[in-house]
Each structure stands twice: as C-alpha cells, then as structure tokens.
Image (cartoon, rainbow, N blue to C red):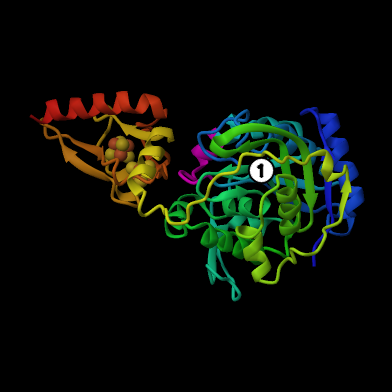
C-alpha cells in the first residue's frame, strides 16, 4: 500500500546541488513511467500571503527552480499555482509571485505562472468531509500535478506537510470559510485527504522542502532534507518518523482509518538514511481540539487584521461609481454621501474577507492595497477624516 520515499541530504540552497538531488530521486523512484516528455505539469507550491521567501513558510524558490529545470530537461513544461487564503485575484497573485521569487523562476525556466482564476466542481463519492469540492480550474489545464510543500508545525492544526499542502488547491476565500467550519485537526485532516483522493489520478509526485522547517510558534529549524514520494501519506509518514511525531492521532491516523496507509508497515526509504535527519527534540505544537475557530473568532480576526494586507478607499479620490460596492461578495462596501452630496465608497472592515475583488474591479484604480502595519494609521486617519467631514 505504501510507496517508496526518497530522502536527500541538501546542505544549502545551491541550484546545482538541488538539481542533483531531484535527478537522483527521480531515478530511484522511477518517475519516468508517469512523467513523460511533452507533458504539462502543475507545480503546486505553498505561497501563503504576507510571507516572504525567507520566512520558511513559502516553498523555497530555488527548490522550485531546481525541480522545474529538471522537469524541463525531461521536456516537460510547468505551471506554478497556489491560491492564498485571502485574496485570489490577478493583482494579488502577481504580487505574491513577485514577493516569493516565483516570477524570477518563470523568467529562468520553461514555466508559466497560473493566472487562470476559474474554479470547477468535482464530486467525491467517498469523501468524509466533502462529497463535492470547488477546486482551481488550472488542474484541468495540466496532465499531472506535483505537490511541493513545506514542513511546519501549526499551533492549531499540528503537523503540516504533503497532504495538507493540497488545501491550497481550494480557491482563495473559500478556504477561510472551510477553516472556520473544519477547525478541528481531525476534520481538517479528513478534508485534505478528500482533496488528495479527488485528484489522485493526476497527483503523480509529492515533494517536501524540509531544508528549513518550522517548529512550534514558527521557529525555524534546519533539517537539510528534500523528501519525495509518489504517495503523500507515505511521504508524511517518513517525515513524521524523522521528526519523532506520534502518529496515534492526526492526518496519518485518519488516512489509516480510511484504508489509505498501514502505519504498522515499514516504508522503504532510498537516498540518504533517515537516521541522518532524525530529530528527537523537534518542538511540536500542543493541539487543543477543544478550541475551535468559532470560539476564537475574535482572536483570529485580530490576528488576520494584524497580518493581512487590506484595501483602503480614500473618499477624496473615489469617483462614487459604485462598481466596488456591487462586486463586494460580503456587502462590506456601502455607498455614502459626503456633505457636498458626492457619493463615495465606505469599507466596513468587520465584513471584509480580504478577497480584493474591489481592488481589481475599480475602474479608476483608487482602491489601494495597504500594508498591515500601515493599515491602522491610515485607517484611523481615513475614519477620522470621514467623521469630521460628515459632521
Ligand atoms: S471590501 Fe469587499 S470586495 Fe473589497 S476586499 Fe473586502 S470583501 Fe473583498
Ligand atoms: S469602484 Fe473605485 S471609484 Fe468606484 S466607488 Fe468603488 S472605489 Fe470609488
């Protein structure tokens, strides 16, 4: 049931070392049966918003670049895709591609950056948490998917690795709603397994960029490992062995209960021995399943507000056309009159879900994107200005 896993020791983000690691792993795993010349492959990276390439959160651009260059050598074209939780628009994606180094990769390799923002519905008859799913339409543009995730501990969801990285195939803002609904580790794990099962025909390879990992509280820890497998559960299982994670609960337990992996089976590993990477003291998050996002909604909202770029509309430059108000999915933008009887758009931030549709749609380009820290100052200034003006 399990698949072979390759683990390679990579002591630096050197493009030639990384390419050798991919070439050797591809040969050991015999990926040539599934990855063939002339194919187009989706490289599903991890590009969370508000994170730069040095944070350890993002799939490293040099790892992505090395992988794509090796695929290009095999005459395979690639498209890089992910969807951040808040804001899945052309502008937002271009900003992310630039900030995370993916734009530079696209310029150096035979690879596109995904700009297909359409979605499609897929049925999952055996789904546990979803019987049907809305996923990124770019999946339909490719012959195969390579899932390239990071290894990190999340303070609420626990171990995040290969299987959970597939959550990014759910389009932008829908993820926010799903995370609110499936806030328990068990539910979220099963939802990610549902995605993996829904796309399993196309999911040909899984890569974990574990050169830099994140321990509890997002503390960086060097592991110097690139791990690869055709099967996301086998890959996560080997990585959890390396990190000394107890598998009695979490994503692998759920996968086992669905007959997708046998945790008593010894998974065969090729490449560098896992003893070389093994950590006994990797700081794990303490998962408290009694907490959920519904109960912590206020805290979560504050976290998002503090860390999220957001929109700002200055009523002095707003033309009052109302386009943003019509397109806003949550009714967060209301049109108001100023004291001169001119219409302007007012954003109610308590309703904003950071989709940035207003930013993309404004025909006069007056919906600004502002930095999280700058936000408070600017927002307070705008609010103060609005109050004074309306009195
Ligand atoms: S104001 Fe509305 S359209 Fe603009 S980012 Fe917020 S939710 Fe999206
Ligand atoms: S779309 Fe632009 S100009 Fe029109 S109301 Fe909204 S912010 Fe103002």
Question: Taking 271 as reference, is 185 above or below it?
Answer: below
Q: For residue 186, say whether it is visible.
A: yes
Q: Position of residue 17 (x, y in %)?
A: 85, 31
Q: Which residues are magenta?
A: 84-95
- Along the viewing direction, whichever of 78 and 21 lies nearer the viewer: 21
Q: Quadrant of residue 260?
A: bottom right
Q: Quadrant of the C terminus?
A: top left
**Residue at left offset 57%, top offset 63%:** 190
- Along the viewing direction, whichever of 91 and 57 lies nearer the viewer: 57
Q: Quadrant of residue 169?
A: bottom right
Q: Secondary structure at mark 1?
A: strand
Q: Quadrant of ligand 1?
A: top left
Q: Magenta stretch containing residue 133, yes or no?
A: no
Q: Which residue is mark 1?
A: 151
Q: Position of residue 368 (x, y in %)?
A: 38, 31
Q: Quadrant of the N terminus?
A: bottom right
């Amino acid at each position: 049931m399990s698949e072979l896993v390759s683990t390679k020791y990579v002591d630096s983000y050197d493009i030639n070392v990384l390419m050798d690691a991919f070439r050797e792993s591809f040969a050991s795993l015999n990926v040539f049966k599934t990855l063939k010349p002339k194919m187009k492959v989706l490289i599903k990276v991890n590009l969370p918003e508000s994170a730069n390439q040095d944070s350890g959160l993002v799939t490293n651009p040099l790892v992505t670049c090395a992988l794509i260059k090796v695929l290009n050598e095999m005459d395979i074209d690639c498209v890089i895709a992910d969807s951040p939780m808040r804001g899945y628009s052309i502008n937002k994606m271009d900003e992310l591609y630039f900030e995370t180094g993916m734009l530079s990769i696209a310029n150096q390799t035979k690879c596109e950056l995904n700009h297909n923002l359409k979605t499609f519905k897929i049925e999952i008859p055996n789904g546990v948490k979803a019987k049907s799913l809305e996923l990124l339409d770019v999946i339909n543009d490719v012959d195969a998917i390579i899932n390239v995730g990071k290894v990190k501990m999340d303070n609420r969801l626990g171990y995040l690795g290969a299987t959970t990285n597939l959550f990014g195939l759910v389009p932008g803002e829908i993820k926010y709603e799903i995370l609110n609904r499936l806030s328990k580790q068990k539910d979220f794990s099963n939802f990610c397994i549902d995605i993996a099962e829904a796309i399993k025909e196309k999911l040909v390879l899984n890569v974990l960029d574990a050169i830099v990992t994140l321990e509890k509280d997002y503390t960086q820890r060097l592991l110097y490992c690139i791990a690869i497998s055709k099967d996301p559960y086998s890959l996560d299982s080997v990585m959890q062995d390396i990190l000394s994670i107890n598998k009695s609960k979490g994503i692998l337990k759920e996968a086992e209960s669905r007959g997708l992996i046998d945790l008593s089976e010894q998974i065969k590993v090729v490449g560098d021995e896992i003893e070389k990477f093994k950590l006994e003291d990797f700081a794990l998050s303490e998962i408290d399943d009694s907490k959920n996002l519904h109960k912590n909604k206020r805290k979560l909202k504050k976290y998002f507000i503090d860390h999220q770029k957001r929109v700002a509309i200055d009523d002095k430059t707003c033309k009052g056309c109302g386009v943003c108000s019509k397109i806003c999915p949550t009714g967060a933008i209301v049109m108001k009159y100023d004291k001169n009887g001119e219409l302007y758009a007012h954003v109610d931030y308590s309703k904003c879900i950071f989709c940035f549709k207003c930013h993309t749609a404004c025909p006069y380009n007056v919906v600004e994107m502002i930095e999280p820290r700058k936000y408070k100052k600017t927002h307070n200034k705008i609010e103060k200005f609005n109050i004074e003006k309306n009195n």
